[in-house]
Image (cartoon, grey):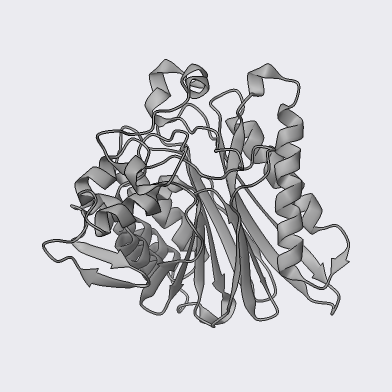
Amino acid sequence: MSPALGHGARWSIATAQVVGTRPEQQDAHSRCGIRLDDGEVASVVLVADGMGGEAGGALAAETAVQAFVQACQDGTVSDIALRLRDATLAANAAVGGRAAGDPSLAGMGCTLVALALGRGRACWVSVGDSLLLRLRGDAIERLNADHSMAPALDEAALSGEMSFEEAAAHPQRSALLSALTGRPLSLMDEQSVPLAGDDIFILATDGLLTLSRGDIAAIAHCAGNPVAIAPSLVAAVNARERDDQDNCTIVAVRGASAYAPRRSRKAGLLLLGLGAVLVAAPASTLLWRGSADKAAPKAARPAELDTGRPGPRSTAASTKAKALKPSAPTAPTDRHRKRLRPKHAADKKADAVPAT
């Protein structure tokens, strides 16, 4: 676990990471500022999750993060959203340029999610399946789009085309539809929402999906500020002791005006322990849909759809409903099979589908 803390004029940011059961850390994160033409500096935080195996996963994530930060800091701008888009395109180009001409780096890439806070709004851009969550009051919701096959499979289950259990176990569930690889981006989520004084934002790689949204919300509200939120969530992930735990990187952001009363050092230590104990218990029976938790009815989707981390990631060729049937799953490409190390083949990320 490696926590870090930074303070802006109005926001406090903390990060924590864990390698899990992987041989190395292939997540990367950073923070920077965007200088605006009215004199304000928007605070930016970002997370990237590398893919492509040992040869390129970590390199792709670090390359993307460095290029993104450099692009954000290039001069003064009037439009935060446009700067985020340009920085994402620069990061994508940097990853492709780094892999060009080196066969050992073929197929490397990464996800990316970046959040900018400025002018009273939260703006974000994301590619892939890394998460941007917002806690506001008692509600928790995912703000950014999930560019994996999981949403399409869940819709197929809701429409009755397959069971929730089949959707959760589908071999293509974690296949990425878009990622930073140097190829044209097939999907890029760009949105913004107004800020509220009590907003808490959590950026995370998919290793956090070991926890349910209910557990994440409970731990974050109990912690109260990023200094405790990020390490508490990482401690909770570790407490699950999953044999296939992926890298997990968490960046927590909260407005300084919304801090809970200051706690003593002893209380803070007890809080970390409470977080670990909370999620070490059996999975919660509460399921989260949208921004509020609801008790799961008998016919509701299984908890794995909200609490379990994605299964092995592979290349998705289509989101058509007929391709979602478990009897005829889309197999990973031969290129993907060759790239995976046998020991961890079931857990490696695959390259994204190229744009059509």
The residue lying at 72 percent from left, 34 percent from top is 96
Q: Is residue 64 above or below residue 244?
A: below
Residue 176, above or below 273: above
Q: Quadrant of the C terminus?
A: top right
The residue sitting at the left extreme is: 298
Front one among 331 and 203: 331
Q: Position of residue 261 (x, y in %)?
A: 45, 79
What residue is rendered at 26% in x and 54% in y? 157
Of residues 108 and 138, the one drawn nearer to the viewer in this rendering: 108
Give the total number of marks visible in the rendering.
Answer: 0
Give the residue drawn at x 60%, y 48%: 186
Q: Is residue 229 above or below residue 103?
A: below
Which residue is found at the position 35% from the left and 40% from the top?
323
Position of 121 with respect to 168 (left or right) is right
Q: Nearer the viewer, residue 76 or 222?
A: 76
253 on left or right of 312: right
Can you name the residue that lies furthest to the right here? 75
- Left of 207 or right of it: where is 211? left
**Image height of 69 relative to 40, above or below:** above
Residue 136: x %, y % from top left? 44, 77
